[in-house]
Image: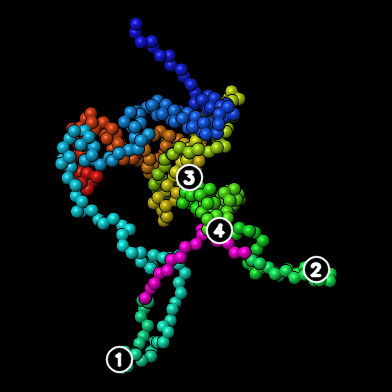
Amino acid sequence: MGKKQRQRLEVNPAELAVIVERTRGALSQDDYVKLKAAMDTLAFVTAELQAKGTSLERLRRLLFGAPTEKTDAVLRKAGQPAGRVQHQEEKKAPAPGHGRTAAAAYTGASREKVAHASLHGGEVCQGCLKGKVYPLQEPSKRVRVKGMAPLVATVWECERLRCNLCGEVYTAQAPEGVGEEKYDETAVAMTGLLKYGCGLPFHRIEKLQAGLGIPLPAATQWELVEAAASKLQPAFDALVNQAAQAPVLHNDDTVMKVLALTREQVQAAAAGAPLKRTGVHTSGLLAVGQEHPIALFFTGRQHAGENLADVLQQRAAELSTPIQMSDAQTANVPGEFATLWANCLTHARRGFVDVAADFPEECVPSASVRERAGGGQ
């Protein structure tokens, strides 16, 4: 008897999410977390396999990380002689970041002038006793770096006096500028910078601050940055308007997880009205070509192209068509807005890397290409 044909069952990812959610009460928290992670991985792998043009090699790189894509390594894997690409290491400039940091680089440091203890300009030289000494334009500099908590605190202990007869209490006034708010604007700005500028999670900032004796709970951090967001909205709107006028715009998507949107998806599926869009992305948009580059981030169910279209709505009509730099995914196209679409050459090269083992001769770069690439890197 032949093998029994396995029946294929089509399951919507949203239905899987509802089923997993039903197991929350029946399983322990650890078991539920493991099951949910497994289902998320299954949904991701299934989506990648169904995506147009996804190969097993590409899926392997997505799951386990990409190996080196240097031309030598790719050709060796394809069975070609490694010596066909000549490296030119001696022509490479030394990597930046080596050597001691100059004192001039410490632009945020406080600076204090230190006068000589016994000499002043115009006085007789203590060595030869004939000439006179004069100040040099460049002083001798010494840098001293100290450690401190990202957020520091001062406790003002205002003295209180009480009358032993009438009981009246007199409290000393706090110094001018202390104010009534516990967290001033610099504390809010530093919290936002650590979270969104440096990528530190709130709970990690909480642990750091607690270890340094300046408690800052994660919930408090969120309340601070949430309250400050509305105050920054005018600045964000101005950046969007300036980015819209840039001659070159880069855009792309990355997967993001937002708990509120995930709950919305689960609730809609449970109600029998699944959302048309279930994916959540953060779109990065970089506007260059002006005085300063502008980086914008948008998180939600829209793709990078739709977010770029929202920005281009503010572009001046008299400006020329902007250059758009991205990969070739249609999700990056800004709808009805015209751009000079410059696709990423690195993504194009990876297409050759994927098929190099099957078409080694066709994928070997020419001598002129190797020379421009600095030895095939």
Indicate yes or no whether the magenta region holds residue 72: no
Instruction: Report the magenta stretch's main SS.
Output: loop
Q: Residue at x 53, y 48 (%)?
A: 203
Q: CA distance from mark 1 to mark 3?
A: 66 Å
List x then y, in percent, for residue 96.
31, 57
Q: Amino acid at mark 1?
A: Cys
In the picture, residue 177 is in which quadrant? bottom right
Residues in magenta, as a range: 140-155
For marks 1 and 3, the one nearer the N-term is 1
Viewer-side label of 4, 2: 4
Pointer 4 residue: 213
Viewer-side label of 3, 4: 4
Against 53, residue 96 (above or below) is below
Q: Which mark is residue 128?
A: 1
Pointer 3 residue: 297
The residue most toward the top is 1
Q: CA distance from mark 1 to mark 2?
A: 72 Å
Viewer-side label of 1, 3: 1
Viewer-side label of 1, 4: 4
List x then y, in percent, for residue 148.
50, 62
CA neighbours of label 1 inside 10 A, class few (<14), some (14 to 19), many (20+): few
Q: Amino acid at mark 4?
A: Gly
- Left or right of 175? Residue 86 is left
